């Protein structure tokens, strides 16, 4: 597989102590560095962050990820050093995550705390957005966790593409699965465009979704959804959904929400 782009590709994932970047801390960060020439993994990255100001990790987080206070104390590095290593690993590669709107604010918040910033500001992408563009919710309806939004979780897409499921909710395992999902999504894009579009086209094209992919109105076309809900959704949902609603209403967004 060859990606028609001038940059290599970096896919990363984080595990955090809390959901909100203002209070949550990065416990683990992992990444794979992918060749644009053949799609193969050139290098891998993984660090635990040993935050000395953290006295405990919430039990639910440890249960979900397996990361405990002992883990970061015994295997973790100084967060500033770990973050600098991560930025050096990424370099100027196209950088993506699954639900980038979660991972990127955590990285930015940690960078601000540690006063550690990247040399480059590489172009970014979100595999959740790419999946929303390329896969209909009807294709995923029987694979998720029973919730509409669960249809586009990483574990669901892993099942959809027939990828071997590894230990979920560990950054190093998740990022390996995400790499495979990313490659499958790109293959699907190439098939749909008959190979006539480039990688940059894939990254930059704002696809128009035809129906709501999740929420209480999932599966409905925009014209069949109450306008009050559309007004709320255009300001609160992920970019492809928000932009598709705004296109339908004649008010397209001019940039991605996470930039």
Image (cartoon, rainbow, N blue to C red):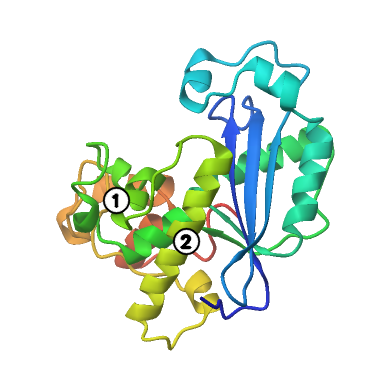
Q: Nearer the viewer, residue 218 or 71?
A: 71
Residue that badge 2 annotates: 182
Question: Badge 1 local density, few (<14 within 10 Å), some, or many (20+)?
Answer: many
**Placement of 190 over or under 183, stated as above or below:** below
Q: Quadrant of residue 6?
A: bottom right
Where is residue 72 drawn, in percent x and y? Answer: 70, 23
Residue that badge 1 annotates: 230
Where is residue 161 drawn, in percent x and y? Answer: 33, 58
Mark sitting on residue 22: none
**Of tags 2 and 1, which is closer to the observer?**
2
SS state under label 1:
helix
The answer to whether residue 54 is visible is yes
Q: Nearer the viewer, residue 95 or 233?
A: 95
- Left/right of residue 64 with respect to residue 22 in the rendered view: left
Residue that lies at the very extreme toward the bottom in this rendered image? 196
Tell me what residue is drawn at x 53 percent, y 20 percent: 62
Where is residue 168 drawn, in percent x and y? Answer: 45, 37
Tell me what residue is drawn at x 61 percent, y 46 percent: 104
- Left/right of residue 82 with respect to residue 15 in the rendered view: right
**In the rendered image, which quarter contains the C terminus?**
bottom right
**Placement of 15 over or under 249, stated as above or below:** above
SS state under label 2:
helix
**Placement of 147 over or under 175, stated as above or below:** above
Between the residue at mark 2 and the residue at mark 1, the CA separation in whole angstroms equals 29 Å
């Amino acid at each position: 597989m060859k990606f028609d782009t001038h940059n290599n590709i970096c896919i990363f994932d984080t595990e955090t102590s809390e959901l909100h970047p203002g209070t949550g801390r990065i416990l683990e960060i992992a990444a794979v560095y992918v060749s644009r020439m053949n799609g193969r993994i050139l290098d891998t990255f993984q660090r635990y962050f040993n935050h000395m100001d953290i006295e405990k990790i919430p039990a639910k987080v440890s249960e979900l990820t397996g990361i405990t206070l002992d883990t970061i104390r015994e295997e973790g590095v100084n967060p500033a050093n770990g973050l600098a290593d991560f930025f050096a690993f990424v370099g100027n590669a196209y950088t993506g995550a699954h639900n980038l709107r979660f991972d990127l604010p955590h990285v930015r918040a940690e960078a601000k705390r540690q006063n550690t910033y990247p040399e480059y500001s590489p172009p970014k992408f979100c595999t959740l957005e790419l999946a929303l563009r390329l896969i209909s919710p009807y294709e995923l309806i029987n694979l998720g966790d029973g919730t509409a939004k669960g249809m586009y979780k990483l574990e669901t897409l892993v099942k959809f593409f027939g990828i071997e499921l590894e230990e979920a909710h560990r950054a190093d395992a998740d990022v390996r699965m995400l790499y495979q999902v990313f490659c499958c999504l790109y293959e699907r894009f190439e098939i749909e465009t008959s190979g006539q579009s480039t990688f940059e086209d894939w990254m930059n094209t704002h696809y128009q979704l035809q129906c709501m992919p999740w929420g209480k109105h999932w599966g409905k076309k925009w014209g069949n959804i109450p306008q009050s809900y559309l007004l709320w959704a255009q300001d609160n949902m992920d970019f492809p959904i928000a932009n598709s609603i705004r296109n339908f209403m004649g008010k397209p967004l001019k940039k991605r929400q996470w930039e």
